[in-house]
Amino acid sequence: MKYCKRCGIEVLGNREVCPLCNSVLHREEPENRERDTEEDSFPDIAAKHRVRRQIFWIATYVCVILEALFLFLNRLFSPGVRWSLITGVAAAYILSSLWQMLSRRKGHIVKIYFQAAAVFVLLAGIDYSLGFQGWSIRYGLPCVLLALAVIILVCMIVNFANWQNYLTMQIFMVLFSLGYLIYSVVGRGGNRILSWIVFGTYLTLWVMTMILGGRKAENEVRRKFHL
């Protein structure tokens, strides 16, 4: 740290002259230089990114080695049962979740969407490895959607100051649940009862948010959709 004898002030950084009187700055005693260095330093962001990448690649290496071992054991002892596919899907889910947790560039709403999709893919992979009985679509998907509705409600309560940020998410999920309802009614792959429950849950959540939010919720919808 440097100081100006004329103004009697301390100046941080690498300045050579005083910003007030343009006089030449003088250095303090050596015992004070360490504190100056600490105050004028910045965190090494690049080092943190390197550590995150290293953690992710180490986890990837471990998962690949374990999956290769499981695949070998599956082919060796039980070739008729594809249980190694379950471990492979689980490893992919773990790695994708770890990548999301280590990523600082994505908001929590994107991470919530990603986790919900990853859980459903995990259930679908398990269902497929067991011969695909269709339970991942009839029961797994509705349960994931209901859990996502609970998460949205909890996030709105915890982040009450910015509750309107979840309106777009609610509208999207109302449309998605409506699509699943149509699929369940028209086709035979879904669960009609659970699809009605999921659609009713999201529709009720959105309507109650619009009613309680009042003008603020209406303005947020107009702003998001440029109405």
Image: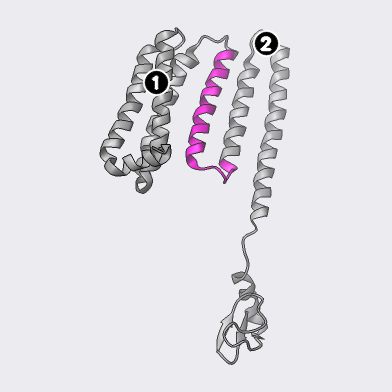
User: Which residue, as the protein is rendered here, is positioned at the far bottom?
Assistant: 6
Q: Nearer the viewer, mark 1 or mark 2?
A: 1
Q: Is residue 168 left or right of residue 216?
A: right
The answer to whether residue 176 is visible is yes
Q: Is residue 127 above or below residue 12?
A: above
The answer to whether residue 148 is visible is no
Q: Is residue 159 left or right of residue 134?
A: left
Q: Quadrant of residue 219?
A: top left
Nearer to the camera, 195 or 79: 195
The kind of residue tagged 1 is: Leu
User: Which residue is rendered at x = 57% and y = 35% of the image?
Assistant: 97
Residue 78, disc = 2
Q: Quadrant of residue 153?
A: top left
User: Which residue is rendered at x = 54% and y = 42% of the image?
Assistant: 106
Q: Which residue is mark 1?
A: 178
Return the x and y of residue 213 as percentages of the image width and height. Answer: 29, 41
**Label 1: few (<14), some or many (≥20) within 10 Å?**
some
Q: Secondary structure at mark 1?
A: helix
How far is the residue under mark 1 from the one under mark 2?
42 Å
Secondary structure that dominates the magenta span: helix
- Which residues are drawn in magenta? 101-128
Return the x and y of residue 79 as percentages of the image width and height. Answer: 69, 10
**Label 2: few (<14), some or many (≥20) within 10 Å?**
few
Return the x and y of residue 150 as percentages of the image width and height. Answer: 37, 32
Mark 1 / mark 2, whichever is N-terminal: 2
Q: Is residue 44 above or below residue 51?
A: below
Q: Quadrant of the C terminus?
A: top left
In magenta segment, residue 122: yes
